[in-house]
């Protein structure tokens, strides 16, 4: 199904000197970009580089402050997403906008202009999904579908408008490797038809694999335009980050010590209708070891963190053991006093209170464990501001936290800097056990590398580290052992060197045990 | 033209200080308009409402008497509101504190001892705290909305008081008036200063405000209150229990409201009557917000709101307007305080025109 009127050589979209100001802050500064017919064009950049702002201007969500957008040789002003769709620009957002209670066809029909019968939509949708290798059942309820399938709905929805340009925002961040492979096939089909794809990502490998050209943004400016296949991951990263990203070195692993953190047949029933119940989880982390738990979001990672941290203690005291003592019914501060540290996934409103200054956020995690240093006045528990401020300064320096003042509110820091502080406030205690959920989620490459190195170093120094992560690159960088969580069940751990991405992908899809025999799960 | 609210990059310190003053100014302006519409000269009306009550010593004493319960209650409420517990039933806790504290002087009126007064105060606090324990229990263990339960319990308390003073506690020598016997000298909260009626309730209010201010500013408990108020999840991460905080804040504010109740009865009224409060428990909500939920700010705000009560009485006499004017002013003030707080987080911009980016082909 080639696109009519696709003349091969003229550019499809040219963006010149596009600028978007928010107050005096330039989110996009003088951006130039050209997308040709039938190419997959990558838009690379760290968080906050201006990728989303640029794309929102192309899709009519934001109005540019200055500059010009030329579409098929005509200067256009894109006033709304509807106008963008009319031009032939389709978009698949990172966060899906689907009604879970409705069927696939109903969701698609909702986004269509005019009156088209549901049966017709369903027919068209299944025809398209078939043609592009995106299997979808139009009658299925969205609530029953996996994240990958939901993304397919969004893609089909975009394709129904017969777009010339499809914009995909971080499409693989929620997919298993197998699902991602399938997506790439679809993208190549679209390309073969002469359609163009703008592919936003910060995953260098993917970009090298499927993209024809890349435009790199940093701090709202274009820092490079290149053929990604001719570059190395390091050179791409350099364009993204501005300096060479320090590679995490996990070499020279220390000798493994005693078991410091253990879960014994940990089962927790779901607290809310949307939560996942944990089923018979067994894990052991020894001193000097980094156990990474891989898995697609929403498979029980948050619930596992809650149970291990003691934010929600569990009924069976022996189910969680820290330094070989049962702590299942102890609360989080009791576990901290035994030498454990915790970094939750959500920075704002969980790991930190956004409106409070950094020093208060330091106290948040350590008021009990460091009571001797931070509190005075006996039973009055008067906060020793000077001691807290000194520690805040120490942590900021140790982790290179860049901030606007001496003690700014946590909410004013960028994601990466706040995460460095949140990790730093635990490292500062030299915890014997550290449990981290999504250590570098939404964090720029520079900060991510620093945080990962810190985790590796902590393990080398003899602590037990548990990392829960969705990011396979991260997992392979830091882990000595890897286990996979799927639907609240945890696979056996495998030494990181012996595990391939494909195997992890299979485990993520709930295939654990089937390759190894079903008894393997309960081996302990 | 349209008005746009633009989020500020950070909270404006200037406006967080100015906001109550702007609100007060707006209240004066709109109050003046209201007087003009009623056919009164706004300047003289506002003068007799807000300035005259401050011009004589005895009326300053009245101001302190009225400010005392407002400050005491609002200080307790500030802890509740900061920890995200919305106790709206301080009026009921005030009444139950007054009733519990009056057990000694009404039922055991024979017992004369210097211990009577301190015991009355303690029992008043206990009565208020126990009454606040009902919504606290319902919220902590049944997940009930405390706004509704605490508010509904106000009417329970009011009717209970009404029944008591008309029934079992009615003064046998009181010619069938719905009142208890008047308190004996041992049961009356003494005056603080020789020049007038101000009783020790005002001192309690100031002491409570300073203690709570100290707690909020310097201690871990204060930190716990603000953390749980801003994010329950972060509080859980810190190891703070939001369930215990419900109990703590509700019992504290109940106890302070109860203390205000027994102080008012023992110091100012000296007996129980069917109505012992002109709505102090509700007005204290305004006081708490006008004082920016800061105990020291609440002292000032309490004096301002006490002035609206005095002004209402004065305006009734000198202008011949209804004392409901007091309620109007209090309502205006709460409205403006809450709306002026927008300025702290947002910048207001008037946009005169807007790019009407036409659709592509210019049609439409």
Image (cartoon, coloured by chain):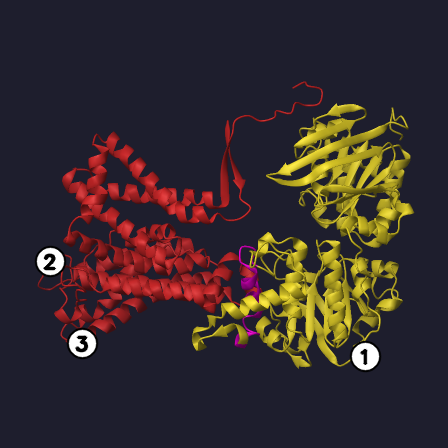
Chain colours: A yellow, B red
Please state which of residues A291 and B211 is positioned toward the viewer in this rendering: B211
Nearest to viewer (mark 2 / mark 1) = 1
Q: CA distance from mark 3 to mark 1?
A: 74 Å
Q: Quadrant of residue B217?
A: bottom left
Q: Which residue is mark 2?
A: B176
Asked if labels 2 and 3 share a chain, the reply is yes
Q: Is residue A358 magenta?
A: yes
Graded by Cα atoms within 10 Å as few (under 14), some (14 to 19) or many (20 or more), the crowding at tag 3 reads few
Q: Residue A209's x, y, as percent? A: 89, 48
Q: Earlier in the sequence, mark 2 or mark 3?
A: 3
Q: Residue B332's x, y, as percent? A: 33, 41
Q: CA distance from mark 2 to mark 1?
A: 90 Å
The residue depicted at 65 percent of the width and 79 percent of the height is: A326
Nearest to viewer (mark 2 / mark 3) = 3
Q: Can residue A269 be seen at all in this image of the molecule?
A: no
The span picked out in magenta is A353-372
Q: Which residue is mark 3?
A: B114
Q: Which residue is mark 1?
A: A255
């Amino acid at each position: 199904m080639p696109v009519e009127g696709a003349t091969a050589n003229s550019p499809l979209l040219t963006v010149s000197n596009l600028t978007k100001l928010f107050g005096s802050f330039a989110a996009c500064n003088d951006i130039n970009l050209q997308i040709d017919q039938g190419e997959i064009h990558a838009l690379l950049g760290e968080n906050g580089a201006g990728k989303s702002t640029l794309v929102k201007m192309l899709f009519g969500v934001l109005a540019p402050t200055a500059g010009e957008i030329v579409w098929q040789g005509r200067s256009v002003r894109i006033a709304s997403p509807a106008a963008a769709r009319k031009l032939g620009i389709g978009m698949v957002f990172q966060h899906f906008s689907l009604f879970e209670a409705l069927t696939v066809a109903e969701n698609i029909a909702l986004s269509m202009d005019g009156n088209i019968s549901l049966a017709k939509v369903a027919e068209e949708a299944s025809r398209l999904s078939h043609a592009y290798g995106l299997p979808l059942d139009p009658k299925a309820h969205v609530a029953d579908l996996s994240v990958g399938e939901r993304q397919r709905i969004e893609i089909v929805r975009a394709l129904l408008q017969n777009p010339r340009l499809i914009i995909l925002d971080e499409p693989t961040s929620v997919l298993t490797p197998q699902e991602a492979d399938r997506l790439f096939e679809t993208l190549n089909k679209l390309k073969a038809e002469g359609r163009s794809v703008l592919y936003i990502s910060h995953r260098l490998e993917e970009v090298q694999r499927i993209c024809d050209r890349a435009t790199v943004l940093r701090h709202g400016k274009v820092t490079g335009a290149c053929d990604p296949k001719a570059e190395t991951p390091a050179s791409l990263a350099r364009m993204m980050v501005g300096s060479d990203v320090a590679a995490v070195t996990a070499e020279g692993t220390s000798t493994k010590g005693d078991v410091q953190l253990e879960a014994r047949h940990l089962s927790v029933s779901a607290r809310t209708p949307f939560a996942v119940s944990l089923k018979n989880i067994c894990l052991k982390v020894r001193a000097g070891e980094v156990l990474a738990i891989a898995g697609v979001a929403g498979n029980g990672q948050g619930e596992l963190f809650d149970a291990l941290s003691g934010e929600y203690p569990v009924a069976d005291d022996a189910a969680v053991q820290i330094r070989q003592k049962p702590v299942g019914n102890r609360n989080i501060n009791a576990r901290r006093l035994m030498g454990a540290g915790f970094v939750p996934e959500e920075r704002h409103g969980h790991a930190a209170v956004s409106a409070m200054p950094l020093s208060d956020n330091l106290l948040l995690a350590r008021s009990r464990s460091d009571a001797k240093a931070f509190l005075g006045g006996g039973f009055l528990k008067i906060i020793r501001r000077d001691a807290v401020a000194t520690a805040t300064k120490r942590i900021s320096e140790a982790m290179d936290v860049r901030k606007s003042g001496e003690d700014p509110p946590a909410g004013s820091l960028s994601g990466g800097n706040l995460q460095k502080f949140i990790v730093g406030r635990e490292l500062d205690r030299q915890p014997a056990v550290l449990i981290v959920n999504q250590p570098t989620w939404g964090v720029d490459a520079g900060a991510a590398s620093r945080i990962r190195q810190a985790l590796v170093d902590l393990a080398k120094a003899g602590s037990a580290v548990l990392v829960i992560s969705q990011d396979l690159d991260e997992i392979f960088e830091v882990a000595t052992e890897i286990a996979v969580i799927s639907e609240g069940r945890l696979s056996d751990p495998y030494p990181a060197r012996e595990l391939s991405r494909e195997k992890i992908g299979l485990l993520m899809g709930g295939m654990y045990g089937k390759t190894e025999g079903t008894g393997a799960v309960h081996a302990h | 033209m349209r008005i746009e609210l633009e989020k500020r990059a950070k909270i404006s310190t200037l406006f967080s200080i100015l906001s109550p003053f702007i609100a007060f100014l707006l209240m004066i302006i709109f109050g003046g308009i209201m007087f003009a519409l009623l056919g009164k000269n706004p300047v003289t009306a506002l003068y007799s409402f807000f300035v005259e009550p401050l011009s004589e010593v005895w009326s300053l004493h009245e101001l302190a008497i009225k400010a005392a319960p407002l400050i005491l209650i609002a200080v307790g409420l500030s802890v509740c509101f900061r920890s995200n517990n919305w106790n709206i039933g301080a009026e009921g806790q005030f009444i139950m504190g007054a009733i519990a504290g009056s057990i000694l002087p009404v039922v055991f009126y024979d017992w004369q001892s210097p211990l009577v007064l301190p015991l009355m105060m303690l029992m008043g606090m206990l009565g208020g705290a126990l009454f606040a324990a009902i919504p606290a229990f319902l919220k902590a263990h049944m997940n009930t909305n405390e706004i509704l339960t605490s508010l509904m319990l106000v009417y329970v308390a009011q009717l209970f008081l009404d029944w008591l003073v008309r029934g079992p506690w009615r003064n046998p020598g009181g010619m069938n008036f719905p009142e208890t016997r008047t308190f004996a000298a041992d049961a009356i909260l003494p005056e603080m200063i020789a020049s007038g009626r101000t009783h020790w309730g005002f001192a309690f209010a100031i002491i409570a405000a300073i203690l709570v201010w100290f707690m909020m500013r310097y201690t871990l408990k204060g930190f716990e209150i603000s953390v749980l108020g801003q994010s329950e999840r972060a509080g859980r991460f810190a190891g703070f229990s939001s369930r215990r905080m419900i109990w703590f804040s509700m019992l504290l504010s109940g106890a302070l409201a109860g203390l205000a109740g027994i102080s008012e009865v023992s110091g100012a009224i000296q007996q129980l009557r069917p109505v012992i409060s002109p709505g102090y428990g509700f007005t204290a909500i305004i006081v708490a917000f006008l004082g920016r939920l800061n105990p020291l700010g609440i002292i000032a705000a309490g004096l301002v709101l006490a002035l609206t009560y005095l002004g209402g009485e004065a305006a009734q006499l000198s202008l011949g307007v209804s004392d409901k004017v007091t309620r109007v002013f209090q309502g205006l003030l709460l409205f403006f305080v809450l709306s002026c707080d927008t300025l702290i987080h947002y910048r207001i911009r008037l946009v005169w025109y807007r790019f009407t980016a036409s659709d592509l082909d210019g049609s439409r």
